[in-house]
Structure formats: structure tokens, C-alpha cells
Amino acid sequence: MKKKHLVIVGVIILSAIVILGLYQTFALSGDITKDTNGYYNVTVTDGTTVTVPAGSTKTVYYKLTNTNKGIVKYGIGYSGTNITVEYFNDTQDPVTGTVDYGKSKYIKLSVQNSGTTSSTATLSTILGYEKGGDLIVPSGVTLVTKMTNGYKGLAKLIAEDTFAPNSTVTNNSVTYQYDTTHSLMKDIGGNIRYYGTNAETEEVPAYKSSYTNEMLGTKYPSVDSCLEDLAYYNVCSPDVDGYEKYGYSDQATCENNYDIGKEMFGFEESFTYNESKTKFCSGTIKEYVPKEINNYIYFNCSDYSNQSSSTCETWHIIGVFDGKVKLIRGSKIGLYPWDNKDTSTGAETNDGKNDWTDARLMKLLNPGYESEPTGGSLYYNSKSGNCYLGLNNATEACDFTSIGIKNAETRNLITNTTYYLGGMDSDSKYPNQIYEQERGGAVYTGRPTSWTGKIALPYPSDYVYATDLSKCSQDLYAYNSTCTSNNWINTIISENSDWLLTPSSDSADRTWYATSLGYVHDAYSKYGYGITPVLYLNANAKIKSGTGTSTAPYQLSI
């Protein structure tokens, strides 16, 4: 997560009044804005009120200064219709405590409006002598005592607080904003997506590489310091062994010809002392550099109060779309046909049917089809039974009791969403063209262009935008190993081919899928390929902990 910088602007002087020997003062508050450099500016004003839109939350840094001659206790009070104020656990100073004369405290507050109209929160400081007993809270004012149970709305955290573009990438004449620090990019539709891979190589200066560290015992701060140490390995120098020992007439000839790679370091490859200067110090080395994409999240948990790898599945965040977070399961739920109908059961051919609104796979994944004798809502309800698998309406036993949607808590997190069913007629497309075709009207005769439901499959655009476009400039037809190896979704589907959501626009029975080699083709819908569900979280989904890493996935607040 991006480091946040805090800039306090303004000066606050508090006045005090005496009430029964104790002091009570009213502090000022400041709203936060983020500038283009990622700095958070807190402008302290002369007011004590914060206006919060309906159903929204504002983060406020509250500053108080003690002008009383002595140490005093402090707390923060609030009032307002439908207003709740809580403190963040990463606040700079505690929400209650003591403050010395002339000193200030900064408390990070969450001001929440649960109403359907805008509301104003009034904040105030409650003070008292250090040994003067409890704070006196005025009538109608509530003391802030509770820590907020959700750090941030997850969509806002990713799309607004984390995404900070620092470069651009142009693909098919479209310029995309990239945040290379957090592996985030903005697609042609303005959605924020994760891209790239968790494993990559990059060129690093040889003097500070792991390779040099392994060979010479340390990483160096500069080329010169590396060369200085390397001189101790120069067996051609009179200060070490001397060139005569190796049969050379002078030092320069020895340094240019004697093989220290095999003879001294025991390498299979040969290199001279002069070549070793470049190899260890002045050159560059392609080195594996782990770069974790922080899009891991615990989901479908059996116990949301104790989230871990043993109580939850690990899913991945694809990105933020229209204010909602889209997830993809971290592994497949099995191999099933997209739809294996034949002409006897409503298909135009015997090779399946590519209408998602009536597809047998859709009915397996989603609620509302419990009355279907085969496959109906089995995954959504964690049931077992028979599923369609094989050609011409064939079925087999299937069991989702351990890998299906586990409970009502999880089902309540999944929102109904409109999925687009625009078709593709070719894989000779770039990401922007694929995205636009998915949302277009090119479909086989009579097919719908959208569907509203809970659980679906990834789009082809989800797949291609997961690639680092700075390393993959070609269209989908020309995909190569560079494209697939820099695509984090490919790591999920690489074991088997995986069905995608998008149908072919020029046939009644073909649908697009990602192959085990990472390419995208279309195939008859009757075939059994890997199924990796995707879904959208409710727009108000919040996280209570985690940083999105593989070792600390985000944890949802339930």
C-alpha cells in the first residue's frame, strides 16, 4: 500500500473555560485532500464541523492543543444527526489520554453518516485536570471511544487511495495510465485493474546483484568499490601470484588471456580477469526479482471472525469496476462444459449452445435453479448431485460440499451485476477492441447482449488486461510466451484450459476459452474445460485487516 504523507496546515489556539474546576475546550478540525504527488494535505480550519454526504464516510485529522498551564486529560466528542465518529487504529495519537501544556495531539477519525441525506458532524474537545476525575461530557455530545471496524471501503482503497499513476503505456494507439509501484492500471473503460506477474526478472547493476554477492561475498555500493575488492582476485598482479607464474610475459597479457573463470572460480564457463570486471562490477545482470501483486483476499470463509488459509479460500482481486470490486477464485472448481445441449434439448447444433442466459454452467453457479434436476445451483448452495459433463447431454456425479459457496455470509457479499455478452469474431484483437466488443451488440442471431446475475466467468478482457502491456504489445492472435509469462491470471488457468464468458459472434455453438499455453481460441461449448468463477462484491465491502499480500491477504469486515 502506498505510503501516505501528512501535511498539517494552519495553527490552532484553544481557549478554555472553567466548569466546576475542570477545563473544557473546543478544537478545530481539518478535511483531507490528496494532491497529484500522492501527499495528503490536512487543512486546519476555524470551524468545528464536517459535512458528510448521505451514506458516506469522511476521514478527518483532528488537532487539539493544550493552552492550559498544566497537564490535562483530553477526549473528543461529537454530535449530529445519523452521525457516528470512530477512530482509526493507525491514528498518530490516542483518542483519549493526557496532553502537556503547549503540546498538540493529532487524532485520525472516521466520520460516518448512515442517513439518506447529507448531515453535519460537530466535533469538540473535552478536557479535564490530569487528577481531576472523569471528563465532563456536555449533554447531547457523545465521546469517541470505538475503533472503526473497517479501515476502508475496499473499492476506494484500491481505486482512489492506492492507485497512483507514475507512467504510461501505449498499446494499439491507446495510452494507458500505469502505477508500476502497485501493479495497477486504468483500462479503456476507466476501470482500475491489477496487471503483471508475481515473478519477473529485471536488469540490475552487477556490483549490487545477488550473483556478485554469491561470488565475492558482498553487494557493493559502487562500481569502484567492487573493482577495488576484485583486484584481490587478480592472480596476474605481482601483488597476488604474478603473471610469470602462469607463463605470461606481462601483466596486461595475463589479464586479457588467463582463464580465471575455470581455474580460480571453478566455473564451467571461461572468462578472464578483465572480463570479470564487467561480469561482477561494471556490467548488468538479469536477476529474478520477486514482485508480489497485492491482490490476494480471503473469501468464501467458513468463519469470518477467524479468517485464515484454513477457514477461507484465497481469491484474487481483478480490479474495481463501477465502484465494485471484482474477484476471481484462486483455483478451478473442476472441468465442465459451458453448455452441452444438443438439438434434442434446445441447441441449434449437436455441439452445444453459447447462450449464457440459459447455459447449464450458469445454472450450476447461480441461485434460483434449485428445481433443475441436474446441476441446478449446486455450486452456489454447496451441494452434491449430478452435473452436465460430456457430449450430448451426458452427466456425471459432482460434489461442491467443500468448494461451493459455504454460507449466507458469503452469499450476502456477492452482488447482482450486469455481465456483458457481446461476442467476438476473431482473436486478432487488441485489449481495447476486446473490451469494446464484449460490451457491443455483435452476437449470433437472437442471442442477448447482457445478463444480470451473481457468478460468471472471466471476460477475455480480464485476461488480456492482466498482462503487462509494456512487455506485450501485440494483439491476442500474436500472443507469445512473453505475454503469457507476464500475466497473473495465466498462473491460475495454466494447468488446464479455462472457459471465458464471451461467445463467438458468428456461430451458435462456439465460445472463447484460454488455453493451457495461455493463448485464447474459441471451441465448441460442449467440451469440458476448467471453470474459475468470478463475482463482484457489494459496493460497500470493507476490509478490517490485511495488506493484500500472499502472506497477509485482505480480510473482509462482516
Image (tube, rainbow, N blue to C red):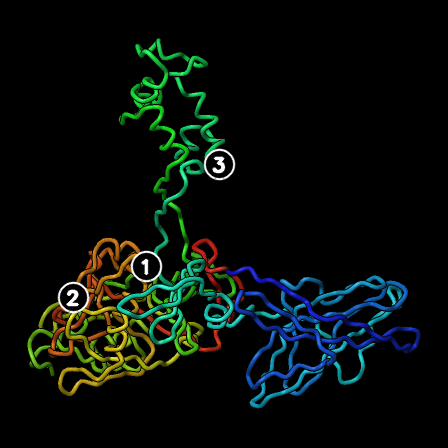
**Residue 247: x, y in percent?**
30, 10
**Picture quadrant of residue 474:** bottom left
Q: For label 1, count other residues whose C-alpha is less than 10 Å away and answer few (under 14), some (14-19) or many (20+).
A: some
Find disc 2 in the rendering and name its residue.
Answer: 521
Find disc 3 in the rendering and name its residue.
Answer: 222
Viewer can see residue 353: yes
From the viewer's perspective, is the residue at label 2 or at label 1 nearer? 1
Mark positioned earlier in the residue sequence (3 or 2): 3
**Residue 244: x, y in percent?**
35, 9
Q: Is residue 425 left or right of residue 450?
A: left
Tag 1's secondary structure? loop
**Residue 242: x, y in percent?**
39, 12
From the viewer's perspective, is the residue at label 3 or at label 1 nearer? 3
**Residue 519: x, y in percent?**
20, 61
Residue 484 lies, with reference to residue 352, above or below; the image says: above
Residue beneath the point at 80% across and 63% down:
103
From the viewer's perspective, is the residue at label 3 or at label 2 nearer? 3
Residue beneath the point at 32% across and 79% down:
367
Look at label 2 and name its amino acid.
His
Pick whichever, 553 or 183, lies toward us: 183
Residue beneath the point at 58% across and 69% down:
149
Q: Is residue 414 left or right of residue 157?
A: left
Find disc 1 in the rendering and name its residue.
Answer: 470
